[in-house]
Structures are given as C-alpha cells and as structure tokens.
Image (cartoon, helix red, strand yellow):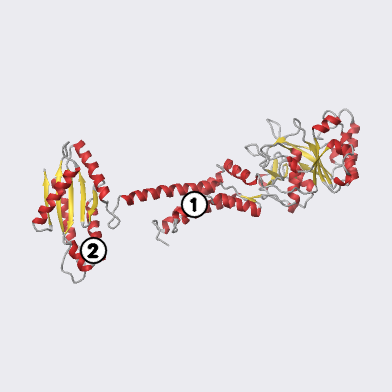
C-alpha cells in the first residue's frame, strides 16, 4: 500500500468531522423528501402475492347502482353480515362510519347489532377527529349498541406523509394512550408481540387530550388495488358469490366507489388511487405474512449515516483512491437496499449519500489542487519548476512595470556539482541538491519571492520590489549558509559552494523577461570567470 498524502492521524480527524456533520444532517431530517423518493423507488415494484385469506367486499359503483343511493339502511349491512356468517367467514372488518344512530328508524341499529352478535367476529372502526381550534381531538366510536356487539375495535387512522403518500401505519393509536389496534391489525387478529413497530413513547409525554400513536411500521403493499381479491358488495348480498369463496376469509367491507371513498396515494400506486378499506386490507395481508417493514431507530439511522461518510474518508487513503471514490458513491443507497430487501428494515440513505458526496467533492478539489501544485513543482527539490519560474518572472515583470519598482533576478549554480556526483554517486548528488534547495527556499522568505530549480544544478530566485542592495544582502547570506554545510561525504575535504549572477532593473516597455534571464546569465558567467564561490551583479 502506498503512503497516503495525508497522515493517518489527520485522515482520522477528517473522518470524525465527516461522521459528525453527516450524523447531524441525518438527525435534522433535512433530506426527508430524498429519503422518501429513494424508498418509493425501492419498494415501488417490490410486490408480493397477498395473503389468500384476505378479501375486500367492495361498495363499488356497480353496488351503488344496484342497491341505491348511499347511505344504505343498516339492515342492508345486517343482511350482508348474515351472508358472511352463513358462509363461514373467519373475521369481518366493517369499515363503515357508525358513529351516530339511525335517526329515521332505530330498528336499523338493532338489526345491525344483532347481525354483528350472530357473527361474533366483527371488527369495527374507531375514527380519529383531530383537534381544530378550541375543539380537542377525540375518538369517534360506533354507537354503544353496535360497539358492544363487536368482537374488537380498531382505529382507521391513515398515516399520510408530508408529500401526500401513505407509506406506513401506526399499529396502535388512541386518545391519551395508543390503546386501539389498527383496523387491519384487528382483522388479522395477531398476538400483540407479533406486530410491533418502533418503541413506545415516553409515558411522561402522554396526554389525556391528544391523539397518541405508537408502533410505526412501513406498509409493504401487495401491489395496485386490483392485486387484492375483491368482490362486489351487491354480488355477495344477492348470493351470487359461491359461499366456498368466503369461507375462512378475513374480509374488509368498505367503500371503493370513486367520489365517495377516501383516496390514498401509495408507493406502488402512483398511477392509481387506493381506498382506505384497501389500505386496511393490505395491512392485514402484510401482518399475516410477516412482511411489515420496520423502521431503523433514529439513533441507529444517524450513527450509520455518519459511519458511512467516515468510511468514505478512510477508503480514499487506500492504494486506488479513484476506485474507492466510485465504490463509495453508491454505498448509502446500496446499504439501504440491502437492509430493506434482506431484513425488511428501512434506513433512509439521503443523509449518508449527501455526506459521501461532500467528502468526495472536498477530496476531488484537494486532489486537483495537489495536481496543480505538483505540475508547478520540481519533484526532487520541492521548489518551483521551470514553468513556474517563467510564469512568476512574467507576472513580476508586469507588476514592476506598473509600479515602477525594481525587480531582481538571481541565477545560482552549484560549483563543481558534476564532480561531486561522479565521485559519490547520484544519491549523494540528489541530497546535495535538496540541501541547497532548502537554503534557497529559506532565503526567498517573502510571500511574493519565488525560488525555482532552473535546470540540472542551476537554481533561480525572483525577488520583486528588491533593489541591488537588497539582492546583495540575500545572496551574501545564502552563500555563507551554503559554505557552512557539512562535506558531502565523510573523509571528503571538498565543500559545497555557489556561484551567483544577479540582474536588477526597473522594467520599461522595452525590457522583457528574457532580458532579465540574459542579464543574470551574463553576470553568472562573470562570477565564474572570477573563480567561482562568489557573485556578480548587474544593477541600477
């Protein structure tokens, strides 16, 4: 494994920062719409064969045309229940509003209550009336005569998300405490522990005046409404349905006719509306087959999102960072899909994906910056390369022409470098160049000063706003520091020395960068002619 450009201690620190930022974004639920879009995409075609015992007896358009205008007398429902009782239906959810007595004929209520008692396995809905203005939330139960005859009551509250899609259900709800099971759960008639969602809320938060909900799960729908077996209410009432098709069935009786039944959008029915009764039938089918989708607790959601972002930071330090980047990008979505499809767990991937994208963006910017720096640096010495030198000289020449201040160019040659290289080898020669380069860089200390490797054993310094006297001070200090360097090799009496040429001018329209190079080069040759280990200057 290659050495990472960043120390692992710093990489770990960045991983911790990515973890915290992503976990905070996850906890804030700022990307809930993106989470829900991902969920809809993953479950939209994830249908299953519905439980064979679940059946919808639909109050459809045909039933309204044959029986008459809605609402029907309750004795009609009593006759239907008797049909289901005689056929041996396992359980019946009568998903109808029965919260007020029949004001025209009280015998209608008595007939329906008697039919419910004869069946003995009828589930009735509890409606939730939300708080509005000064009115507190309340439960709307069937009238006592009818409610007392039922085997169970179940709430028919539909959980609709902020974007108008019904993706889940609270398996228990009620005023003050969540004591009513969902209607679909009551129809399934499962043990309480067989259908649990997220943990109960803190009892200290319970209020006798608020609608409380608990045990949230995501509904895995069997598919579009027609995926669930349906029979027309009128056909069942008129005896046109074989009793064998009703025997041992869990039946939801409810409204599906357009314009009367409430309409719901679900992840699997974006092109089709689903009625509330079909929604409850899907809940029962799902619970009977154990296909409910549990939601990952918020703490685990945040921790996993942060861990994936932190893992992305660490993976980028491996041998193939671009491959790691490509693998990291879909990591959030892949994790969410695997949890959903293998464990029926929903974990929203949006925060993790956002965190990974931010990590990759910062990493890409850093890598591009590093490449840009490397493209302008000499690999051996770390100084600017020939390209960087020419760019800097041009920029400073233009700046000096505008400001009227002097510009000094320094060309530096390492004396007898080839002899050192041939005598002691290239490794020692490279070390000499690095030592000299470090001292040159130390003397180009101002922000705009630029030190570069000009080529081979030659170096250059561009010193803006520097007159002859200032340039002389810089090169005299540099020559002294180089002379103080230890011998290149043990037992070698030779020392490292420099020969330097300096050219200083205030540029005008006739003076260009190549004139500075030619002037400094001429001064360098004069210094060599004078015996090396010194300098020559050409300045005004």
Disc 1 residue crowd, few under 14, some 14–19, many 20+, Cα 10 Å: few
Asked which secondary structure carries label 2, the reply is helix
Asked which secondary structure carries label 1, the reply is helix
Image vertical order of residue 137 relative to residue 520, above or below: above
Residue 6 image position (x, y, % from top left): 39, 56
Q: CA distance from mark 1 to mark 2?
A: 42 Å
The residue that appears at 58% across and 42% down in the rendered structure is 32
Q: Earlier in the sequence, mark 1 or mark 2?
A: 1
Answer with left or right where residue 393 lies relative to residue 315: left
Image vertical order of residue 238 relative to residue 19, above or below: above
The residue that appears at 66% across and 42% down in the rendered structure is 267
- Mark 1 in CB contact with mark 2 (< 8 angstroms): no
Residue 424 can be seen, yes or no: yes
**How many numbered discs sit on the rendered protein?**
2
Answer with left or right where residue 289 lies relative to residue 380: right
Residue 484 can be seen, yes or no: no
The residue that appears at 87% across and 31% down in the rendered structure is 73
Disc 2 residue crowd, few under 14, some 14–19, many 20+, Cα 10 Å: many
Q: Quadrant of the N terminus?
A: bottom left
Determine which of the numbered discs, if any, sits on residue 326 in the image.
1
Residue 280 image position (x, y, % from top left): 75, 42
The residue to which callout 2 is attached is 429
Determine which of the numbered discs, if any, sits on residue 304 in the image.
none
Answer with left or right where residue 31 lies relative to residue 197: left
Q: Nearer the viewer, residue 499 or 152?
A: 499
Q: Quadrant of residue 3?
A: bottom left
Answer with left or right where residue 247 lies relative to residue 220: right
Residue 495 image position (x, y, % from top left): 16, 64
Q: Residue furthest left?
A: 530
Residue 396 image position (x, y, % from top left): 22, 42
């Amino acid at each position: 494994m290659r050495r990472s450009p960043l120390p692992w201690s710093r990489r770990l620190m960045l991983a911790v920062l990515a973890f915290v930022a992503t976990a905070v974004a996850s906890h804030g639920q700022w990307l809930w719409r993106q989470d829900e879009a991902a969920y809809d995409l993953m479950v939209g075609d994830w249908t299953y064969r519905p439980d064979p015992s679940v059946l919808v007896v639909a109050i459809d358009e045909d039933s309204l045309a044959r029986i008459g205008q809605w609402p029907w007398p309750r004795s009609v429902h009593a006759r239907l229940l008797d049909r289901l009782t005689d056929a041996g239906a396992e359980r019946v959810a009568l998903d109808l509003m029965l919260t007020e007595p029949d004001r025209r004929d009280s015998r209608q209520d008595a007939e329906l209550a008697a039919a419910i008692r004869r069946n003995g396995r009828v589930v009735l809905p509890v409606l939730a009336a939300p708080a509005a203005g000064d009115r507190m939330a309340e439960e709307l139960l069937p009238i006592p005569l009818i409610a007392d005859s039922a085997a169970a009551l179940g709430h028919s509250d539909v959980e609709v998300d902020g974007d108008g899609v019904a993706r889940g259900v609270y398996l228990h709800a009620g005023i003050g405490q969540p004591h009513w099971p969902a209607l679909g759960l009551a129809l399934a008639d499962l043990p309480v522990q067989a259908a649990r969602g997220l943990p109960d809320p803190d009892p200290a938060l319970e209020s006798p005046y608020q609608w409380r909900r608990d045990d949230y799960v995501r509904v895995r729908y069997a598919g579009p409404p027609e995926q669930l077996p349906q029979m027309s209410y009128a056909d069942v009432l008129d005896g046109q349905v074989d009793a064998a098709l009703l025997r041992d069935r869990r039946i939801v009786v409810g409204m599906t006719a357009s314009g009367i039944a409430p309409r719901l959008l679900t992840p699997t029915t974006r092109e089709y509306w689903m009625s509330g009764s079909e929604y409850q039938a899907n809940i029962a089918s799902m619970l009977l087959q154990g296909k409910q989708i549990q939601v990952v607790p918020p703490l685990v959601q945040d921790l996993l999102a942060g861990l994936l972002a932190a893992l992305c930071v660490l993976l980028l330090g491996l041998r193939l960072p671009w491959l790691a980047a490509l693998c990291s990008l879909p990591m959030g979505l892949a994790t969410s899909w695997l949890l959903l499809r293998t464990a029926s767990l929903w974990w929203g991937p949006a925060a993790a994906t956002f965190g990974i994208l931010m990590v990759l963006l910062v990493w890409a910017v850093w890598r591009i910056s590093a490449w840009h720096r490397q493209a302008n640096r000499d690999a051996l010495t770390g100084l600017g390369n020939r390209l960087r030198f020419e760019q800097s000289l041009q920029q400073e020449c233009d700046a000096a022409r505008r400001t009227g201040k002097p510009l000094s160019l320094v060309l530096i040659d390492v004396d007898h470098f080839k002899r050192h290289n041939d005598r002691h080898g290239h490794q020692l020669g490279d070390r000499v160049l690095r030592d000299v380069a470090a001292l040159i860089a130390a003397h180009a200390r101002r922000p705009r000063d630029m030190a570069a490797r000009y080529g081979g054993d030659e170096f250059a310094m561009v010193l803006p706003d520097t007159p002859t006297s200032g340039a002389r001070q810089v090169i005299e200090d540099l020559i002294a520091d180089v002379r103080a360097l230890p011998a290149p090799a043990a037992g070698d009496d030779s020392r490292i020395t420099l020969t330097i040429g300096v050219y200083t001018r205030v540029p005008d329209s006739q003076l260009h960068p190549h004139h500075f190079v030619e002037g400094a080069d001429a001064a360098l040759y004069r210094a060599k002619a004078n015996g090396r280990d010194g300098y020559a200057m050409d300045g005004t």
